[in-house]
Amino acid sequence: MKIRSIELTNFRKFVGTVRVESIGDNVNVLVGRNELGKSTLLQAINAVIFERARSTASHVKAFRHFVNQTVPEVKLTFDIDGQSWVIHKRFAGQSGKAILTCIGGAVYEDEAAEAELQRLLGFTGGRGGGEPGIWGTLWVQQGQSLGDLALNEQAQHTIQGCLEAQVGLVTGGARGQRLPKAVREALGALENQRGPRGAFKDTIDQLAALETEIEQMEGKAKTVSDDLAKLATSRRELKAAQTEWDETAYQTELQGERGKRDAAATLAAEMTSARAAAKLARERADVTEKSLADRRRTIGELASFETEKVTIQEGVTDARAARDAAKTALETAERSLADLRAEARANSDTIRRLDRIRDAITLNTEIGLHQETLDQAETLEANILRLTEAIGAIAANDERVARIESASTELAAAEAATNAVSTTVSFTLQADARTRVRVNGRTLDPDETAIALLQPTTIAIDGIGAIAVEPQIKELSALLQRRQDAQDNLANALRAAGAEDLAAARTLAARRREHERGLAEHRNQLVRLAPGNSQKKLPAGVNALKTHLGTLRGRLKSELQALKLETLPPSEALGTDLATARSEGERLAATIANQEAALAGPKATLTEAEVHLNKHEHRLTELDTKIGTRASDLAAARQTRADDALAEDAERLAREAETKEQVLAEHEKTQSESVEAIEARIKRLEATAANRQRAIITLNTEITRLTALVQAQEGLGIEEQILSQQAERDRLRESVRAYEQDAAVLRLLSETLETAEREAKTLYLAPVVQRVQPYLKMLLPESDLIFDEDLGISGLQRDGHTEDYGVLSGGTQEQLAVLSRIAFAELLLAQNRPAAVILDDALAFSDDDRIESMFDVLMRAGDNVQIIVLTCRKKLFARLGAAPLELRKVG
């Protein structure tokens, strides 16, 4: 595909028609300042190819001029397969028009044109417009050159189709894809990123558990060994305890101490009785005092609970009221929201009717514009007649002014030549003497201080005499004749121009030029007023416009009948109504949103009220339970003993305890050695014997226990169990090694298959790599570009390392993306598929050296692919050496 020209009419920022033509086969560059419309030009190319002329999509409506909203048109001329085509689209919504013309051949219109264009350029169409596919990759819009290629699915299919046509299916087909998948699944059944899994992990877990069990059993075996050692020790200690004890000495000492104890016991008995009586009395007094304190506390708690119960009951009442109020508020808010939604639906109906009326006003405005055009045509014709008469009345023109200027120049030269040979006489006179001086009988002018003399002259001075001056000038007659001829020529030229002097002639000529310019402008305006419209089949001329105006008036009448309107409302009033309705719609929407958001408040309030009520009711139940329990306990206690009786008993028992404690104190004063001290010695002696006996019993028991444990462990065959479990451990270890070997084999197989797959992909991508490699060597020698399976750039290999594409600098990413696009275009062309590359400010991040290399790449690639470069950097891209393009205004 070769783009030859592009023409835009009223497209976005452009008013009128602009055109770029004479686009060559190789590299072309369009240089222009910012906001010239270069990106708009690329957008128009995309629009005329991929957007449907009758599309009503918002982005298609955006093609209209952003101020006057005129209907945009785009015409693209291109060559493909040796034939020239012109696609012309008028984006006017449902009345849009598409015409595809094969120069010297068939003509397709509307849907047929859209379908044939899709067939020619190989893209997929749809109701919403065409899918650019690979063209979206080859045509780089401003700001989209940085980053990965990001081929969409259709673009990938296009390139993959070209690759398969050259290298075939080199990855083994579906079967070749199933094998790596099966290997990965088998490996995934054994392990994942966190380690072993499935049966492999279960076996490892079983081995770990078994090793723990073996460790425990070995611990038991050690315990048996320790028990045997303890058994021998216990037997030695038992023998020593039985042979090293003197029973006679022990009994003698014990009986002596017991006699002392009996003597002291009699005295101590009285003290014990007194102490017991005192202790009992004190305990009874303390118990009674505690009972009195507990009863008083219970009475206080009951009073506190009753007070809290009253408060809680009030809280329950308030919480129920709050819940009911919140429920009522929520119901009121929901009813208000329903009313607002009904009002919003009614407002939407009003907006739709106002929009239809606005369309009718637009139609009426178009009628008015056409009528104004007819009125302007009549005015222009009258102005043309007036200007023609005015031009005829002015004789001065540029040619006659030039003749006057030439004559004036000649006169000035003649006078200069004459003055150069004249005799100059200067006067320095007193003010009262000037009237006394006369030159050839003429009195000097007041400001005259010198005169140039060509002929004999007499200067007379009253009262003094006369001075005769006779200049000696050669060829005086020739000089005078030249000056006279110049004066005559100037006079004739001024007379022919109808002017008094050169300035007047120039003024008249300028006025005539202005009239002629106005005449030409009026004639052009008259032609432009009724140029005709091929899309609407409207011939040129005012009469055709009148007929079209009648048709529009018929449409307006029909629309007024449908709207049941006699006349259209004022545009301002409709705009106000529409703005009011839309504002009301926005207000209603905002109010509805606020109401919906406000519902959260009543809902939260209701929930909070219910939680508060439940909390109070739960506390009230707890209080009722506590009050009932405390009241029952208090009533039962009072049945046993009244409050006054309990207080009296507490006071009486306290006095009795004090009396008995005084008696005990008197007895303690008369005591010598206490029974406790003697008893302690007896206990020590008895304890010694008892300890010996207990030691013997303990040792016998320990010997029996250890003997039984040793015999029991030997009966269980702990050693045999350890050997059995060790055999099972060896089996599990072998299983783990087998799983590890299987996983290693699967990993090796997976890596081998991945290597084979990479090699296959390398072969698969070879046509792209082969085409991009020569350009890459020009830009980055000793480097290789790596593509992924989706034909995106994944990295750059250089200096023995692979750098991820995402970590490269913005300029390098941009340059590699351009090289890849050129390679894709060459691949498409090699398969006889259409392709062209358009770069809109696509090298914005390149340094001075890289940009020079990229210029070389573009010019080399231009031998194979048509490349159109759009840029705002005139000085820099002058070094590209590409064919210059120009965006020209037409008409």
Image (spheres, rainbow, N blue to C red):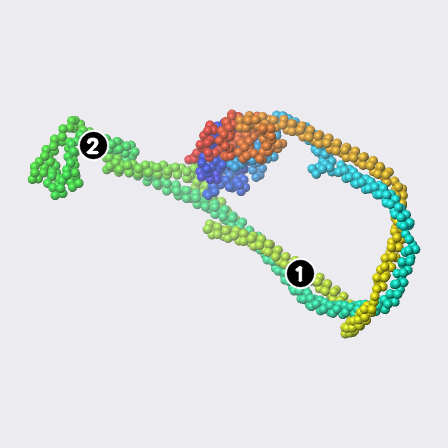
List x then y, in percent, for residue 53.
53, 38
Q: Circle 2 — which element?
A: helix
Farthest residue to the right: give it. 248
Total marks placed:
2
- The residue pinned by badge 1 equals 612
Q: Give the amino acid at mark 1.
A: His
Between 399 and 751, the one lying in front of the other is 751
Quarter of the image for the C terminus: give it: top left
Residue appearing at x 43%, y 37% in the figure: 531
Residue appearing at x 57%, y 39% in the figure: 128
Residue appearing at x 21%, y 31% in the figure: 416
Quick check: 183 above or below 636? above
Please give the label number shown on residue 415.
Answer: 2
Between 319 and 720, the one lying in front of the other is 720
Q: Give the amino acid at mark 2.
A: Glu
Q: Circle 1 — which element?
A: helix
Is residue 371 something that shows in the picture? yes
Q: Choose the circle earlier in sequence order: 1 or 2.
A: 2
List x then y, in percent, for residue 73.
48, 37
